[in-house]
Amino acid sequence: MKKLIIILFFIIPAALFSFHKKGWKHTASGIYYKIYTCDTSKEKPVYGDHIWMHLQKFGLNNKEIFNTKIFDAKIGVEMDFKKPEKKADVTEIFAFMGKGDSAMVVIPSDLADSNGSKKKYYTFNLYLIDFKRKDVYLFDKNEQYKQQMVLDSLAILDYITNNDLHDCVRDEYGNWFVRKQQGTGKPVKENDTIKIHYTGKLTSGKVFDNSYERKEPLSFIVGKKQVIDGLDKGIRDFFYGDAGTLIIPSRLSYGDREVGKIPANSVLIFEIEILP
């Protein structure tokens, strides 16, 4: 039943509001809100906590203009819960919500827009999935990071063994690489603009991206963070004209985020060719 309520909450927009009905409250900044909860005594987050939530926003015409569901985050979108810088910020309502609570929020457009009206409103649906005190969150994050480093190392060693890549060496950043075809060009350096062809794979061998199929090499400036950290740093292990394998641990790729065909905490394998 609770799951059904959550689903309905995020697909049914608010149409009409009567702020004088039971349950509606308002903040000093002029935001109207109504909390849907089974337990009003639940602990509430405070500024400085880390929260996991979903948020849906409707425009003045009652059409949806934003929904965090698009990020397909299974445990919700996470953020640091900070004191809002602007006068009327919907996130301040999280301070009145407990874990698992939903809220409907209405903000008069004159509080959000310079030419807004008191009679027109932006409407939000909020869902607070979880929250942790910042010190607890950071401790848990560090423990997970250390554990994932071990799991990544085991996965990388297995991949090297199973694919006969015994010439692989570890660079100073934590990537592993092997130059299978050595070019005659200069070494790749920071601030170089380079072009590479590549096949991106998981340790299972499943391909998640392939520039050859697109018939278009990837171009980026080394050291400008235009690609994932592991590739940005690991490409400097090669020379122009090289072909080889670059193995990137999850902490230097997407970490605990799921991105497209790439699951969370994935070691990434790049079979690369650096164009002269």
Image (tube, helix red, strand yellow):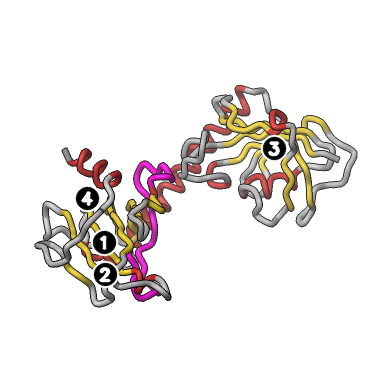
156 inside magenta stretch: no
**Amino acid, disc 1:** Val
Task: Give whichever of discs 4 and 1 has the lower sequence position.
Answer: 4
The answer to if 84 sits in the magenta stretch is: yes
What residue is at 38 percent from the left and 54 percent from the top?
A: 78
- For disc 1, the marked residue is 105
Q: Earlier in the sequence, mark 3 or mark 4?
A: 4
Task: Please identify the dominant SS of the magenta region.
Answer: loop
Crowdedness near tag 2: few (<14), some (14–19) or many (≥20) residues, C-alpha within 10 Å: some
The residue stretch that appears in magenta? 69-91
Residue 123 is tagged as: none
Instruction: Give the label, 2 or 4, closer to the camera.
Output: 2
Q: CA distance from mark 2 to mark 4?
A: 21 Å
Asked which secondary structure carries label 2, the reply is loop
Asked if residue 83 can be seen in this view, the reply is no
Residue that numbered label 3 is attached to: 177
Q: Residues within 10 Å of mark 4 (few under 14, many from 20)?
A: some
**227 up-or-down from 169: above or below:** below
* Residue 63 visible in the snapshot: yes
Q: Amino acid at mark 2?
A: Ile
